[in-house]
Amino acid sequence: TAHSDPNPNHVYFNSRGIWATYVIFIFITHFIVLSIPFISMALAWTLTCQIHNVITYFWLHWEKGAPFEPLDQGESRTLTHWEQLDDGVQFTANKKFLLVVPIVIFLLTTFYTRYDQIHFLVNALSLVLLAIVPKLPQLYRVRIFGINKW
Amino acid sequence: MSVEHEEQFEPTPYVVAIITYIGYVMLAVFGHMRDFLRNHGFEKNLIATEPARTKDFVPLYQNFESFYTRNLYRRIRDCWNRPIRTCPGAEFELIDRKSPDHGWSFEYPGTHTRAINFGSYNYLGFAETDGPCADAAAAATETFGCGVGSPRAEAGNLDLHTRLEATVAEFVGAEDAIIFPMGFATNALNMPALIGKGCCVLSDELNHSSLVLGARLTGAKIKVFRHNDIADVEAKLRDAIVYGQDRTRRPFKKILIVVEGVYSMEGSVTRLPELIALKKKYKAYLYLDEAHSIGAMGPHGRGVVDYFGCDPRDVDVLMGTFTKSFGGAGGYIAGSQHLVALLRQRSHSGLYGASLPAPVAAQVVTAFQMLMGRAGPPGEGARRLKQLEVNTQYFRASLHRLGVIVYGHRTSPVVPVMIFMPGKIAAFGRETLKRGLGTVVVGYPATPIIESRARFCLSAAHSLDIIDRSVQIIDEVTSLLLMKYSRRPPPAWTAGITREWAEAQLKLVDQQRRPHGAANGGPVPRRPVECRGDPPDKVADENDAAVKDNLAAVAAAS
């Protein structure tokens, strides 16, 4: 790479307009779900919340390594994308943003589902387990029961 | 005019950035889909896979790491590694290839394409098959043979090498120089000989991977500063001096600032006068990698030190390569007698690697002699330097007027033109080749994700007609691909740069055919030791005092 940082995954999330693109993708997903005729409003919002949490879980906390060969001699092969962002530094602006977005979606979803119990339970579980717990600094490089270690 | 006013890096337009990201995400989605189809047998799988008997072993390679190569690069890989069948001068002939299966394999129909060469680092046009350099290389092959077969310390020291070292030292303005057969190794394997653990390396963000590898091999503490940001360098220098090493807080033994003269991916120029002032103030050392600027910048071609009018003795380690401007291979390090003597003893590359082969050394020596006016037709060196300078400014000005985003400094012969979107990378490469222009396109991950670009390397071998034709081709292609993103007016310095200006400049050199002054191998006129922040006024015109002197000298001598 032309940059002395051997893995571009560390820095690309600081690029111009990437936060806006992330939000735009969420909007696009939401509109696609909303345009399916037989889904109610509450179900649409819950679906958006679930789809978002599942996809971001796979993108940030399951897939390890980089889609190209970085020059770091394999240091990032066992790291998930979340752990590679900003080279492992915690509490950066990017990490705060990525933590806040699922919470905001959850709050909007609870509003639009009119605080229905089952919807709330399902959304809260997916928020906590898939979106919040993996992002905590205490779980940096932790693999529970060795799942997804290599 | 200061350096800042002559270079620009127009930021990516916001909407373009968003569309670029969406493009990459779509490519990733399709890539995953196609991988799924291939892995489950719905689509022919042409990827190299492990044999069945090793399926239960730990996998050799991570499948994900080759995702980009498999799904993005492979589909457009006809834009890179194009085989050529002639000397890569101003124009070259490419062997045509077609891919019937989207990049998995190539067929060769046997035809050739003649194209303008903007991909080779041929700044002074020394990539030629005849001329004094080629004759010297042939003569050296007859005397010494092709290879050397030994490191310099054993039996591989030819008198050619000693002559080349003396020539390099004189050209660059240093006390002594040492040469190495490989440019990358010059950086990577000599930094460990100069610094070690307990030292600090301040390295520019965009330094070449040879410098990064060299810094890592030393074992020193590496601090990376933002590109060309002198305030950042000063802040990190002060931190290094005040806080010392990491846990022990002992002072660093040496602090080395590592920068390049011209950065080849951006076309930007380092802030040499400020760095020299900084290093003198804080007693640090300066390592200047002039791979792309030696021979290509400066009124006498002596690199970025010459361009700013600084004293070469102020830079502690002057490194450069022979690959770009001199048509050879290998690199050199020049500096004080003491430094070079140390490197002769301690350099890993110099002691263990074979030395520079004789024909290459002869080619490079002759190229240097031509630049100093001691070989070849009279005034040839000055002519090449002037042609490169005129070509660079004319090309850049024309591109600015087209409305594309061009990065870099006004006099840098590396011209990046921004493409941004991944689909357009391949389209630009292919469309320009169809119209007879061969250029290099670069995308993520070699560049930042929203800054993919096409990179043009100007050469003294290009004539003004070639440049006009290329600008026309680029105009066509960028209109077709909607690549004219620039929202700023062309910069102020492009105002007077026209074809007439270029021809007038070149005629000026023709008038100075009688070699004199620096082109005669004499001492390069140097500015006083404390170098100013402003570079010398750019292109000489009839009113320039030096030109007037020269013309007077020519008139007096004739």
Image (tube, coloured by chain):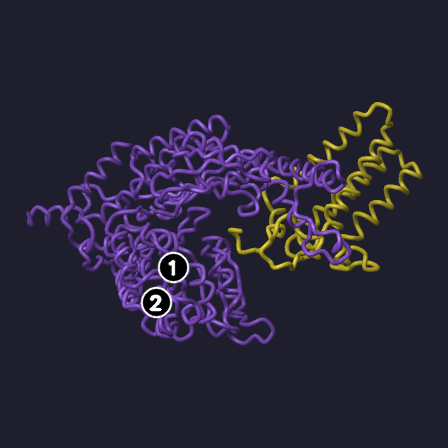
Chain colours: A yellow, B purple
Residue type at tag 1 = Gly
Location of residue B23 with respect to A99 vertically, above or below? above
In this orientation, does residue B24 appear? yes
Kindly identify the amino acid type of the residue bearing the numbered disc 2. Answer: Ile
**Which disc, if any, is residue B330?**
1
Residue B332: image quadrant is bottom left
**Residue B536 percent coordinates (x, y):** 28, 50
Question: Left or right: where does residue A57 sit relative to residue B525?
Answer: right
Q: How far across and down, in percent of the image, does residue B404 sit?
A: 45, 33
Answer with mark 2 or mark 1, whichever residue precedes in sequence: 2
Chain letter for mark 1: B
Tell which of B414 and B84 is nearer to you: B84
Residue B231, percent from left and from top: 47, 57
Relative to the observer, which residue lies in front, B241 or A135? A135
Chain at numbered mark 2: B
Would you identify the image quadrant in which residue A78 lies? Answer: bottom right
Which residue was labeled with disc 2? B178
Kindly identify the residue that appears in the image at 32 percent across and 62 percent down. B145
Q: Is residue B105 above or below residue B275?
A: above
Decide if residue A35 is on the left or right side of residue B218: right
**Helix, strand or loop for disc 2:** strand
